[in-house]
Image (cartoon, grey):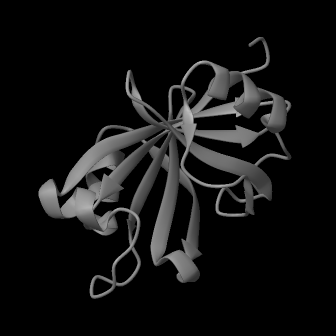
Amino acid sequence: IDSIMFHHIGYAVRNNKISKDAFRTLGVNFFHTSDDVGRNLHFDFGEISGTIIELVSPLNDGKKCDVTNIVNKQPCTPYHVCFETEDIENTVAFLKGKRFRPMMNIEISDVYGYKAKGVFMYSKAIGLIEVIEKSEKYE
């Protein structure tokens, strides 16, 4: 599909403060932080050499969230790659035809620093991906 481009890599971390410090040591510049209280998730977006890294951690350690099982097995690890597209509905339909399975309905989220439609999909060949629709840039 012509309109799909790499957007970021999602990195599940148990302790975002420790992980941010380590990534800063490597030259990552963090530019946006967001919380999703309903999903119990904290997000830190950083950039290095034109590549965006999204640190995802539990907001409240005592409560389960989407990354709880991941960080309980390994305290920090990449777990998804995100792609950006001009038309999310057509991209999702295309990917379904290529054996990618939606893990949820397309939803609107503002964790990126702007509102964007997004969906997580799974492929046995490459694992979990996120697809977001191109929108305005970070505030």
Please tell me in which quadrant of the rendered image residue 70 appears: bottom left
Q: Residue furthest top?
A: 2
Q: Please say if 4 is above or below 109.
A: above
- The reply, left or right, for residue 96 in relation to residue 42 is right
Residue at horizontal 42%, vertical 42%?
A: 28
Residue 83 at what x, y percent from top left? 62, 31
For the residue pair 106 and 50, the one nearer the viewer reads as 106
Please tell me in which quadrant of the rendered image residue 57 appears: bottom left
Q: How many marks?
A: 0
Residue 63 at what x, y percent from top left? 33, 85
Please tell me in which quadrant of the rendered image residue 87 appears: top right
Residue 67 at what x, y percent from top left? 35, 62
Residue at horizontal 34%, vertical 54%?
A: 12
**Quadrant housing the C terminus:** bottom right
Q: Residue furthest bottom?
A: 62
Residue 122 at what x, y percent from top left? 47, 37
Residue at horizontal 29%, vertical 67%?
A: 68
Q: Please say if 107 is above or below 94.
A: below
For the residue pair 22 and 87, the one nearer the viewer reads as 87
- The reply, left or right, for residue 32 in relation to residue 88 is left
Residue at horizontal 50%, vertical 63%?
A: 43
Q: Please say if 135 is above or below 69.
A: above
For the residue pair 97 and 121, the one nearer the viewer reads as 97
For the residue pair 104 and 109, the one nearer the viewer reads as 104
**Quadrant housing the N terminus:** top right
Q: Can residue 113 be seen at all in this image of the molecule?
A: yes
Q: Can residue 5 be seen at all in this image of the molecule?
A: no
